[in-house]
Image (cartoon, rainbow, N blue to C red):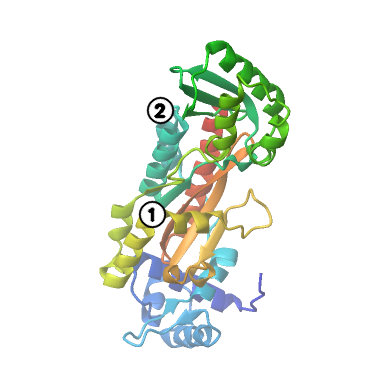
Amino acid sequence: MEEYQLKDREKAILRFVIHQFILTANPVGSRNISKRYDIGLSPASIRNIMSDLEETGFLNHPHTSAGRVPTDKGYRFYVDSLMDPPKLDLNSKKIVDVNLSSAPTETEELLKVTSLILSDLTNQLAMVTYPKFEQAVLQKIQIVQLSSTRILVVVSINSGMIKTITLEIDAEVKEEQVSSVQQLLNERLTGLRFSEIRNTIEERMKDFNSESYRPIIRVFLDSVDKIFTDQSSEKAIISGTKNILRQPEFEDVNQFQSVIELIENKDIIIHILDEKKLPMEDDVSITIGQEIKEEKFSDYSMIKKEYKIGDMHGTLGIMGPKRMDYSKIVAAVVYIAEQLTQELTKQR
């Protein structure tokens, strides 16, 4: 992190300006700080300090107002050095615990509930990505014959999750053929990661040349990318559009449009959520303004954390205006990620 040599008075004023701006969404003046906070400084002294903070890039001075607003640099220093330690109140924790414990046990439904809880607690746009199957380890494959030319493939993963897919076979097959192929696949693929299976299945099966089993083997080889890849085509769940649109920032038509565009293009969200910014994957990540590489979201901040399910992981987080209660939201994101991990672990 870049070192900023701010004096104690400058730190205090920057902190108060950001707190006031978070509360009101209006530029903050020196008189406002003087009246609201007992810091033993005159409005003139506060104004001079705010001017210094503007010169060093921590505050900005909108041309239509006498007050000042935080810059990305100001928010970054606040988040790294000045904000209160993240702590979620007991009532919020209870809401999370009750809703998660009573949610459906299916992973997809649990993730949907998680997204709604996160949005309601933070009043921001909440996002949850599905677990990444690249590191999933195959536990076993079951093949159920639906008809003479259709089979249902049930893939069980070490994390406890199950994936199903229906495949059409070009030739008629019998139950004993299906059973033999199932046994063979389990012998040669169990314990491998999905990424390994996709890359090596042809090599692993090439010496199995029995004519009677070839149609089933062939459909597996042709469908390997469908079978051993991410479970959901959606890949991300987004909640809280109404919450975020109630905020003052979105009275601006351009800002409103950017949110709608974000919601309609989940690929952008997945890309941003998947970006690694931290040296330790267990940490919470806070990305502010222009730190988000998508230029159209330079007026937003994102707070995210990974959750885990066995060998796999996904990401949950929020996106909203830079003017947000960072301490409260960090606490909510961290707690919900931890509780989601616990709920998913129970299901294994």
Please, what secondary structure does the residue beneath circle 1 have?
Answer: strand
What is the crowding at mark 1: few (fewer than 14 residues within 10 Å), some, or many (at least 20)? many
What is the crowding at mark 2: few (fewer than 14 residues within 10 Å), some, or many (at least 20)? few
- Taking the image as shown, residue 67 lies to the left or right of residue 48, namely left
Question: Which disc number belongs to residue 290?
Answer: none
Q: Residue furthest front?
A: 211
Question: Where is residue 307 shown, x and y percent of the image?
Answer: 56, 42
Q: How many numbered callouts?
A: 2
Instruction: Residue at 51% x, 53% y: name it.
Output: 330
Examine the rendering and report whether any part of residue 265 can be seen: yes
Question: Where is residue 334 shown, x and y percent of the image?
Answer: 53, 47
Residue identified by numbered label 1: 125
Q: Is residue 43 above or below residue 19?
A: below
Considering the image in quadrants, where does the N terminus appear? bottom right
Camera-side residue: 344 or 330? 344
Residue identified by numbered label 2: 102
Q: Earlier in the sequence, mark 2 or mark 1?
A: 2
Instruction: Residue at 64% x, 50% y: name it.
Output: 281
Camera-side residue: 268 or 101? 268
State yes or no: discs 2 and 1 in contact (Cβ < 8 Å): no
Question: Where is residue 245 shown, x and y percent of the image?
Answer: 29, 59
Please, what secondary structure does the residue beneath circle 2 have?
Answer: loop
Q: Is residue 265 above or below residue 173?
A: below
Instruction: Residue at 52% x, 68% y: name it.
Output: 293
Amino acid type indicated by mark 1: Leu
Question: Where is residue 253 shown, x and y percent of the image?
Answer: 27, 71
Q: Is residue 143 above or below residue 50?
A: above
Q: Residue furthest top?
A: 176
Examine the rendering and report whether any part of residue 191 can be seen: no
- Quadrant location of residue 286? bottom right
Amino acid type indicated by mark 2: Ser
